[in-house]
Image: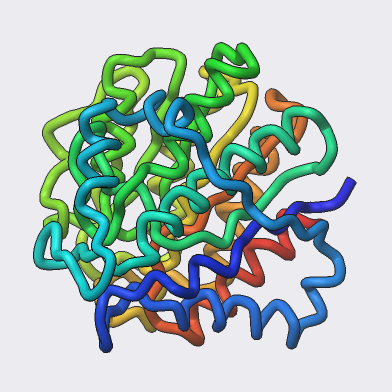
Amino acid sequence: MATAFVTHPIYLKHDMKHGHPECPERLLAIQEQLVATDTLPRLQQYEAPRATDDQLMRAHTESYVHEIKSAAPQQGLVCLDNDTAMNPFTLEAAYYAAGAVVLATDLVIDKQVKNAFCAVRPPGHHATRNQAMGFCFFNNVAIGAAHALAHHGLQRVAIVDFDVHHGNGTEDIFQDEPRVLFCSTFQHPFYPYCGTDSGGDHIINVPLAAHTNGQAFRVAVTHYWLPALEAFKPEIIFISAGFDAHREDTLAQLNLVEADYVWITRQIMAIAEKHAQNRIVSVLEGGYALGALGRSVTTHIRTLAE
């Protein structure tokens, strides 16, 4: 079976202002690298559907979904915080970003594809149950995981997050849900300045100091993530795939390279092969150095497609 590639043209219309690092050019850089490496023809391509409010409300409160809908402007920009703004296309882009992960979850669980990568904007892992922040509006990966639980009846869903920032929104949504194992590595101290004083049996937070290299990252994953995943025996694994821990990304100070993303992808695939019938749904989060982002995502997808 092939690897699915799920995206939608509406993502390119979400634009938070000139010079904002979470820009439409991010997806264009990924697309260009996939074409240049002849990777795209190897993938099963899908256009994302629009998520429903019911799907969103498995991860977010009803009042929050209505709040985001009410905030959407007809023209210009509406700033929800210093980093996070909506233009007239943002609301639809956010609905279609969540829908991509719902579709990918269905495709993987129904065995129509081996695994899936969702090239989406806006990202999601900072969106809490009732707050937008950190470029994020709806928590795409959490919506997919909740769909796997509620719609498909799975009982053990894992989410692994190697973005340079802590996935605080995902933790907030699943902090009281033992059917979800959440594993996160992140630079600390760094935005969103949390994750070191929380955690538990099903929340595995691994802070990394600035300038941590790939070798230390691999040690941390091997020591903390892999035993937890092995003990949990997930039925599906979601990846919050942020590539802003790359050494070329100037928004942070970790020093990963493409080979580290290949390595972590293979570790996740090994767990999925053993326990989850190879079921993996990977979802784009951060990554703002366009060249590094394109190369890193392409190596990640090519590894998934091996």
Residue 151 placement: quadrant = top right
Q: Which is nearer the eye, 206 or 280?
A: 280
55 is higher (above) or lower (below) than 205 = above
x and y percentages locating residue 51 in the rendered image: 52, 40
Residue appearing at x 70%, y 33% in the figure: 106
x and y percentages locating residue 278 in the rendered image: 75, 35
Q: Quadrant of the N terminus?
A: top right
102 is higher (above) or lower (below) than 233 = below
* Residue 295 appears in view: yes
Q: Residue furthest right?
A: 1
Residue appearing at x 45%, y 26% in the figure: 54
130 horizontally vs 107: left or right: left
Q: Which is nearer the eye, 206 or 180?
A: 180
Q: Quadrant of the C terminus?
A: bottom right
x and y percentages locating residue 137 in the rendered image: 30, 50
81 horizontally vs 215: left or right: left
* Residue 245 appears in view: no
Residue 180 placement: quadrant = top left
Residue 47 placement: quadrant = bottom right
x and y percentages locating residue 114 in the rendered image: 80, 42
Residue appearing at x 72%, y 60% in the figure: 303
44 is higher (above) or lower (below) than 228 = below
210 horizontally vs 81: left or right: right
125 is higher (above) or lower (below) than 81 = above
